[in-house]
Image: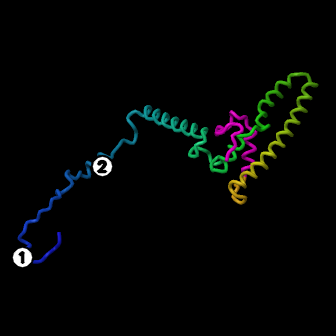
Amino acid sequence: MAKTTGAADSALPETDETPAGKGRATPSRKEQEAARRRPLVPADRKEAAKADRAKAAEQREKARIGMLNGDERYLPARDKGPQRKYARDYVDARFSAGELLIPLVVIVIVTSFLPQSIAEIVILAVWAFFVLVVIDSLVLSFLLLRRLRAKFGADKVERGLRWYAITRAAQFRPLRAPKPQVKLGQWPS
C-alpha cells in the first residue's frame, strides 16, 4: 500500500487479501536436527554393503554396455571424439589382413608339433604374412590420413590417429571394443 498523509486516510481499515504466515508453524531447531540426523553406520551393515556392491555392479555393467555400443559418455579417453569415431568406422568398413593374426598364431602353435620341415615352411609363410600386414597397415594409414584431412581439415587432424587405426585393424573383428558400428563396405561419410 502507498503511504499517504492525512487524518481521513488513517481511519480506513486495511483490507489485505493475502493470508498471514506460511500456513504452518516453523519447526524448532531440535526438530530440524532430528529430521536430518541419520546413523553413521546402518542397522544391518552386511545388507548395506551387499546393496552397495549390487549398485556398483549395475553401474559398471551399464558403463560396459555403453562403451561396447560406442556411447560417447562411456568411452575411455583414447576412444572419444569425432575423429576417433571416424577412424573406427573407416577401419571397421574395410577388411584388414591384421584381423587374421590371432587365427594365424593358433596355426603356428599347432604346427610346432609337426615335423621340423613342415614347421619351417609355416614359419616362412608367417613371415610373409607379417610383411603383408605391415604393407596393409601402411596403406590403411595413408588412406585414412587423406580422408581425415579432407573431412576435418589438414591442420585439424589429431596426433596418433593412424596408430590408433592400425592397432584396431590388427584386432580380430569380434573382439574389438567398442564394437564395430558399421558393416564391411559401409564407409563413413
Amino acid at circle 1: Ala
Q: Secondary structure at mark 1?
A: helix
Q: Secondary structure at mark 2?
A: helix
Query: Measured from the top left, where is residue 165 in percent x and y?
Result: 73, 45
Quick check: 162 left or right of 34? right
Q: Residue at image x 70%, y 55%?
A: 157
- Separation of residues labelled 1 and 2 (CA atoms): 50 Å
Disc number at residue 7? 1
Foreground residue among 119 and 27: 119
Quadrant location of the N terminus in the rendered image: bottom left
Amino acid at circle 2: Glu
Query: Measured from the top left, where is residue 6 in percent x and y?
Result: 9, 77
- Whether 182 is among the magenta residues is yes
Is residue 177 among what the camera can see? no
Q: Residues within 10 Å of mark 1 (few under 14, many from 20)?
A: few
Q: Which residue is mark 2?
A: 33
Q: Residue at image x 43%, y 35%?
A: 48
- Whether 178 is among the magenta residues is yes
Foreground residue among 101 and 43: 101
Q: Are marks 1 and 2 in contact (CB under 8 Å)?
A: no
Observer-side mark, 1 or 2, equals 1
Residue furthest toward the top? 114
Q: Using the image, determine if residue 3 lies above or below residue 122.
A: below
Query: Measured from the top left, where is residue 127 in percent x and y?
Result: 88, 36
Magenta range: 160-189
Q: Residues within 10 Å of mark 2 (few under 14, many from 20)?
A: few
Q: Residue at image x 40%, y 39%?
A: 41
Indicate which disc, 1 or 2, sits on the residue closer to the N terminus: 1
Q: Using the image, determine if residue 131 lies above or below residue 84.
A: above
Taken as a whole, is the magenta stretch helix, strand or loop? loop
